[in-house]
Amino acid sequence: MAQSYTDVRNYFGSVNKVAYEGKDSKNPLAFKYYNPEEVVGGKTMKEQLRFSIAYWHTFTADGTDPFGAATMQRPWNRYTGMDLAKARVEASFELYEKLGAPFFAFHDRDIAPEGSTLRETNQNLDVIVGMIKDYMKTSNVKLLWNTANMFTNPRFVHGAATSCNADVFAYAAAQVKKGLETAKELGSGNYVFWGGREGYETLLNTDLKLELDNLARFMHMAVDYAKEIGYTGQFLIEPKPKEPTTHQYDTDAATTIAFLKQYGLENHFKLNLEANHATLAGHTFEHELRTARVNGLLGSVDANQGDPLLGWDTDEFPTDLYSTTLAMYEILQNGGLGSGGLNFDAKVRRASFEPEDLVYAHVAGMDAFAKGLKVAHKLIEDRVFEDVIQNRYRSYTEGIGLDIVEGRANFRTLEQYAMNNDSIKNESGRQERLKAILNQYILEV
Ligand code: XLS
Ligand code: CA
Ligand code: CA
């Protein structure tokens, strides 16, 4: 028989609060680069990086994969049902505090089990949200974002807001309504939409136009309801090209921005961009971040990395310094993430099943982004790429180039110019030299 729930706050007993010990430390449970109070670029690292822990991967997931059973050893698994949900809250706040993580993020179904009716499900949620709220009163940890899981339950087999079944659309609306109330209750900085099963498998049975229109209708209803209840957090939408459906509607940053603009949602939403989803879309992470940034829509980041040898969403902890550096470069150039943050939407490998692995993994990710922040800041301070880029495009700052960007040129004037300019000269892009400089900064900063 499962033990009943008691208020024992010691799920990571062998782990003390993780401290910054500097780059020469050999202690695996210490930060080598993440020094929360150190100022980089006018703000502390804690303020710049805004780390968040993902509830689903860290406290709810059990290590099952399509080929095998659960592997994760989790001390809270000695409980079941609502006791298990409560124990997870205890364990989560213990870990946030031990890691010094200022934020966390969850799906509704990560924190509380579904009941046999929507009413019962909401009652379960109310109990756990109340408990989380109490913990938040005595801790400095804040909710970065919450979202609705509208992809696990079989009712979402055809999607949620894009389901062919209007009853499912209504159910999903009720779920997001509750999610927005939860966001307000817990003071969540953001509310996320990730289009779980919002996509399609085959056009042979799909009304693509109606599905997209309905998705937009759904989002407008969410915006209206947030306004009605006075929830002022930022709405975020998270692109992903495939998985679980063959064609996800929010394929990548550019597609999602076009969708938001098409349906008049661009003033209400920003993007939550995930590294592994960028890879799946055939883009680099920094491409997705830059695309959102230049459109003024970079909102938050799901910090992880994919395995370039595998074609699916592996959600690994981010340890690739090139990626963290170039991501931080975009984030700093964006002036930070506002109400967003760096959420570790990342899971320990199935074979890293001990509770301590959760700590090692977060330390690895936090250090990789801290190092990325420092390198990116120095690259910007030294104007390493800015000067190169400024020089590379200098032909647009005078003569015919200036006429083009200031709208004085047309095809006739350009033809006249080209007719009299038979000796066009190009300059080298110097890509290899720039990559060598990037290496130098990563190794030396
Ligand atoms: C899944 C997504 C998901 C969202 C939140 O691939 O990354 O975890 O971030 O629903
Ligand atoms: Ca994600
Ligand atoms: Ca993912």
Image: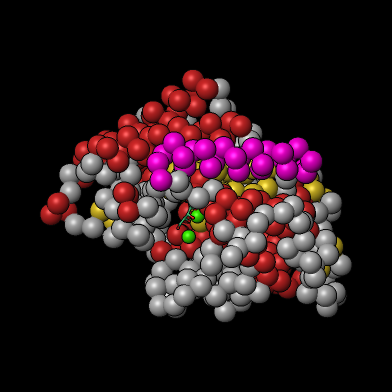
Name the residue at the front extreme. Answer: 1
Residue 156 x/y as whole percent: 32, 49
Q: Quadrant of residue 182?
A: top right
Q: Position of residue 387 (x, y in %)?
A: 64, 54
Q: Residue at (72%, 39%) from the top-left corner?
A: 134
> What residue appears at the point 78 percent right and 74 percent down from the top-left corner?
28
| Residue with the most extreme top position | 228
In the picture, the quarter occupied by the C terminus is bottom right
Q: Tell me: 122 left or right of 339.
A: left
Query: Observer-nearest residue: 288 or 56?
Result: 56
Q: Quadrant of the N terminus?
A: bottom right
Question: Is residue 229 at all visible to an observer of this figure?
Answer: yes
Q: Which of the pair 296/390 is nearer the observer?
A: 296
Query: As rendered, which of 340 and 230 lies closer to the eye?
Result: 230
Stretch of the chain drawn in magenta: 116-140
**Residue at coordinates 26% horizontally, 50% vertically from top-left?**
158
